[in-house]
Image: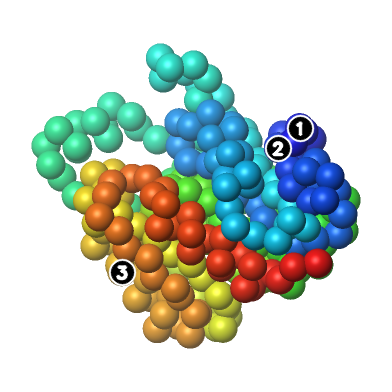
């Protein structure tokens, strides 16, 4: 694995026959969540059951801050104090009323990164899988809905519904797109019920959603890792 810059974003690149992103296999781009270190998901390339030719790109969010546990990264900032107050009060966080400030800029940077990834790694759209965890899942979904970029599959791990009034009408143009969506039934940060609502909207619009629910919180359990490997292999293929 090595570090590389695509567009304006740093990323870790791994997999392929040389384990450094070489070859001409499919490419999986996975985005970390809010507050995670930039390499939070990078270990997945070693444990996912996918063809050896599969390559991985793990972009690092553009925003850097410190939450007391070392450097944290984000795609856009959130009000941490408000979040803590909501959790303490037991309030359900429904973020579906609009887009967070900074999401538009993050989407543009991700779009540029994907252009660069496809150009330099030589991968076609039908062999490109995009997704992420939590905030990374939300950003991936937003990009797929708001642009015409083609991808082989979309991975939404513990994400949620944003900008419902804007997203839902856009979903129809993605009819037939393969989606892997997972969510913990006890997720304290992004309620299970809102994730179900996102699933239902996507399915109603004709996207082919594979839904993986699990007993747990805001996490990526083994059951999701198992399905993710199978999903990548199925939608993007091997060599």
Residues under labels 1 and 3: Cα distance? 37 Å
Return the disc, 2 or 1, that comes first in the chain's sequence: 1
Residue 131 position in % (x across, y down): 56, 56
Residue 142 position in % (x across, y down): 53, 59
Residue 45 position in % (x across, y down): 63, 47
The residue shown at (40%, 35%) is 78
**Residue 151 versus residue 68 in the image, above or below:** below
Q: Which residue is mark 2?
A: 11
Q: Quadrant of the C terminus?
A: bottom right
Residue 61 is left or right of residue 213, and the answer is right
Badge 1 density bin: few <14, some 14–19, many ≥20, Cα 10 Å: some
The residue shown at (39%, 50%) is 221
Disc 2, disc 1: CB below 8 Å?
A: yes
Residues under labels 3 and 2: Cα distance? 32 Å
The answer to whether residue 200 is visible is yes
Q: Which residue is mark 3?
A: 197
Which label sits in the foreground, 3 or 2? 2
The residue shown at (40%, 83%) is 204
Q: Quadrant of residue 59?
A: top right
**Residue 196 versus residue 91 in the image, above or below:** below
Q: What is the secondary structure assignment of the residue under circle 1?
A: strand
Between residues 49 and 70, which one lies in front from this camera angle?
49
Q: Which residue is mark 1?
A: 3
Q: Quadrant of residue 41?
A: top right
Return the disc, 1 or 3, that comes first in the chain's sequence: 1
Residue 64 is left or right of residue 29, and the answer is left
């Amino acid at each position: 694995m090595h570090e590389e810059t695509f567009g304006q974003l740093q990323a870790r690149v791994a997999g392929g026959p040389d384990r450094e992103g070489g070859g001409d296999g499919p490419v999986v781009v996975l985005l970390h969540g809010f507050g995670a270190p930039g390499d939070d998901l990078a270990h997945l390339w070693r444990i996912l059951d996918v063809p050896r030719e599969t390559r991985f790109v793990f972009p690092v969010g553009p925003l850097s801050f410190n939450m007391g546990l070392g450097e944290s990264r984000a795609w856009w900032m959130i009000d941490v104090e408000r979040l803590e107050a909501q959790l303490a009060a037991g309030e359900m966080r429904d973020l579906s009323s609009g887009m967070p400030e900074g999401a538009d800029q993050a989407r543009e940077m991700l779009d540029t990164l994907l252009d660069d990834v496809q150009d330099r790694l030589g991968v076609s759209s039908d062999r490109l899988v995009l997704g992420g965890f939590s905030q990374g899942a939300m950003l991936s979904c937003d990009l797929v809905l708001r642009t015409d970029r083609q991808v082989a599959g979309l991975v939404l791990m513990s994400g949620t519904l944003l900008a419902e009034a804007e997203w839902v009408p856009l979903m129809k143009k993605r009819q037939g797109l393969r989606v892997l969506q997972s969510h913990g039934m006890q997720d304290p940060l992004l309620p299970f019920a809102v994730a179900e609502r996102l699933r239902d909207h996507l399915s109603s619009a004709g996207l082919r959603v594979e839904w993986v629910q699990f007993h747990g919180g805001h996490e990526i359990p083994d059951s999701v890792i198992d399905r993710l490997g199978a999903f990548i292999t199925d939608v993007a293929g091997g060599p």
